[in-house]
Amino acid sequence: MEFSLQESISYWIKKIYQETGQLYNQRLAKYGLTTAQVSVLALLWNFGDGLTQKELHEKLRIRPASLTNVLDMLVAGGWVVRKQDEEDARVKRIYLTDSGKAQESVCAGILAEIERHVQQHLAPEEKAIMLMWLKKIERSFRKEG
């Protein structure tokens, strides 16, 4: 059996990921943010302030060094601060600043705009089926991992 990119699900997932990533980065650039930074901010917006670097690393599934770089940029941009945990001095917790909190509505608007673009040619039933399939594929990675 020959391998065909045109028939490869992973190829199309990666291609869509790259295209949407470019759109996100283009829209976010005028606010001085990247998709990697917004991924961290989104976790703080959704799960609340005070997550540890370890918790962020586990939820994002990126290398600790990569997360440190993203956090350094967010701190330098004034969107988050690192604070020492009150119970364990070795643990750093990440908190949104007022500027970081203010970016939530801007980023939500950008995400909604791109999501509309992604879904524009899908019927509601097609969207539901696609989400079901994508979630099924993602779950299979967690089971194998």
Image (tube, grey):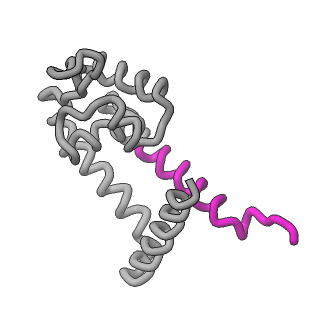
Q: Is residue 121 visible?
A: no
Picture coordinates of residue 5, whole percent (x, y): 74, 62
Q: Residue furthest front?
A: 87
Is residue 36 shown above or below 117?
above
Residue 142 image position (x, y, % from top left): 50, 57
| 144 sits to left or right of 87 | right
Please report the residue visible at 22 percent of the width from the left and 47 percent of the height from the top. Answer: 46
What secondary structure predominates along the stretch shown in magenta? helix
Above or below, comparing residue 3 to residue 40 in the picture: below
Query: Is 11 contained in the magenta span?
Result: yes
Can you give x and y, in whole percent of width and height, for residue 22 in the image? 49, 44
Task: Determine which quarter of the picture holds residue 95.
Answer: top left
The verdict on residue 35 being magenta is no
Image x and y of residue 114, in percent:
37, 55
The magenta segment is 1-24
Q: Write the residue at 19% across / 32% down.
A: 50
